Image: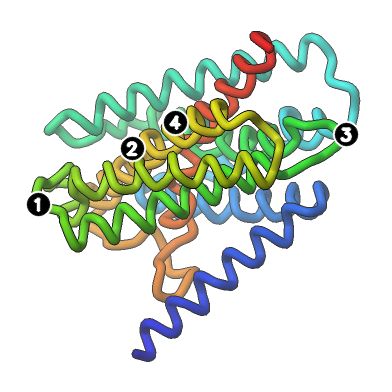
Amino acid sequence: MKDILIRALSGLFYVLLLIASLYNLQTLIALFFVFGIICLFEFNKLIQLKSIIPYFIFIALFFVFGYTQLNINATKGLDEATQILMVITIFVELFLIKDLFSEKTIPLFISKRFILTTFYISSSFVFLILIANYFKPYNPSILLGSFILIWVNDTFAYLVGKNFGKQKLFEKISPKKTVEGFLGGLFFSCLASYFIATFTESLSFTNWLILSIIISVFGTLGDLIESKFKRQANVKDSGMIMPGHGGLLDRLDSIIFAAPFIYLFLRITLYVS
């Protein structure tokens, strides 16, 4: 009972902290900077990378593509550089998906470790900031809606999988995840997209519906990929910063992985609208 209470309070604090930060751009930037450093630290432990270089790369990326772009009029060159960063990040994540479906361990030669810390962790936090600032002036509804969809997907994937799950999704990587749970999370995420579209009036229902599918699919893949990293490292959690939940990366792995795909979809809607 005590463990359940600790887990609930820890999760509630995380959610309230995140939601409170969304209503001020500067606070959100500061919070995601701290979150990014913590996740980078946890991930470096998983892949046994002791270098401080990834932290300098994170700070540089966060400043150039995040903070600077939000506080000055973005030049054409900076916008193009952001698109290049998006393409490289998605390319790296597609390779991680390939590694997920391979029975072999994820290769972690030294150059790949630096690539992963840069384009799997660091750049994803840049895209979270850019998603939050998709509307100008600042309106956090898309980022908040994305987090809500992640939480709905995770919650109902767990509930449906626990009560009705029979067929394993990736048994060797995450034994508790089931196909029925995944489909349940996807269904309720799609259902939640209607209410998000209705109450936020930020995007059309069709766009939110597509986003719910993107977030459910790529969020689940992100969770599984982090689980594979943890299995290779022989650890249950990425850290211990959140009592009852493990590490911060364990809470953010889904949205981190989905972020560049969400941003890509928003860019596409911008061009076709």
First reached walking from the N terminus: tag 3 or tag 1: 3
| C-alpha distance separating marks 4 and 3 | 29 Å
Figure quadrant of residue 42: bottom left
Residue indicated by mark 2: 221
Mark 4 and mark 3 in contact? Answer it, CB < 8 Å.
no
Query: Badge 3: how crowded within 10 Å, few (<14), some, or many (20+)?
Result: few
Q: Kindly give the residue lying farthest to the left in the view shown.
A: 166
Residue indicated by mark 4: 214
- Front residue (pair 200, 107): 200
Of tags 2 and 4, which is closer to the observer?
4
Figure quadrant of residue 238: bottom left
Query: Badge 2: how crowded within 10 Å, few (<14), some, or many (20+)?
Result: many
Residue indicated by mark 1: 166
First reached walking from the N terminus: tag 1 or tag 2: 1
Residue 117 marker: none
As shown in the figure, which amino acid type bears the numbered disc 1?
A: Lys
As shown in the figure, which amino acid type bears the numbered disc 2?
A: Leu
Q: Would residue 171 be seen by someone viewing this image from the given angle?
A: yes
Q: Is residue 231 left or right of residue 247?
A: left
Query: Badge 4: how crowded within 10 Å, few (<14), some, or many (20+)?
Result: some
Q: Where's the N terminus, which quadrant?
A: bottom left
Residue 71 marker: 3
Q: Is residue 107 left or right of residue 31?
A: left
